[in-house]
Image (tube, helix red, strand yellow):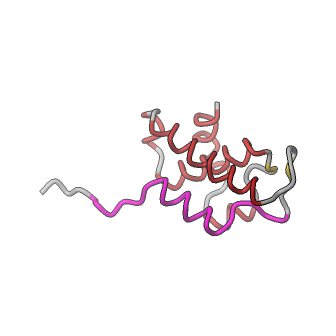
Amino acid sequence: MLNWNLKSITPYQFVHFYLSKGCAFSSDFSAIRIIDSKLLRYLRKYSEFFLDLSLEHYDLNLYKSHIVACAAIAGARKAVGLYPIWNNELEELSGVDWKAIESSFVFLYE
């Protein structure tokens, strides 16, 4: 009666899907440390941190779930020192380019 869409995919589900496919690549470089299993654990933790932070800001509800997830991953990559923050591999994986997530990233990261 209310036309609720109960099959929606949350940003958490998108992030965990993207992380399972890999969000650190051989073309990346780290300004802080070598890319190892510890850095990958931090990447996961920071992604979840930014997702938690997105729940506190109503304005981020205006973005689609996959855009918020991509912004969280970009924020996590920046936090752990992976550069570039958003590269071609991530664009291929998510189907989202930097221009689509830039405003949500700025809102989330700053």
The answer to which quarter of the image holds residue 7 is bottom left
Give the side of residue 34 with respect to residue 12, left or right: right
Task: Write down the region rendered in magenta.
Answer: 5-26
Residue lying farthest to the left in this orientation: 1
Residue 109, x across and y down, in percent: 64, 35
Q: Nearer the viewer, residue 29 or 35?
A: 35
Relative to residue 106, is residue 48 depicted above or below?
below
Q: Does the magenta stretch include residue 8?
A: yes
Residue 51, x across and y down, in percent: 53, 45
Image point (46%, 33%), residue name: 57
Residue 18, x across and y down, in percent: 60, 63
Q: In which quarter of the image is the C terminus?
A: top right
Give the side of residue 9 with respect to residue 82, left or right: left
The answer to which quarter of the image holds residue 108 is top right
Give the side of residue 58 with respect to residue 31, left or right: left
Image point (60%, 47%), residue name: 72
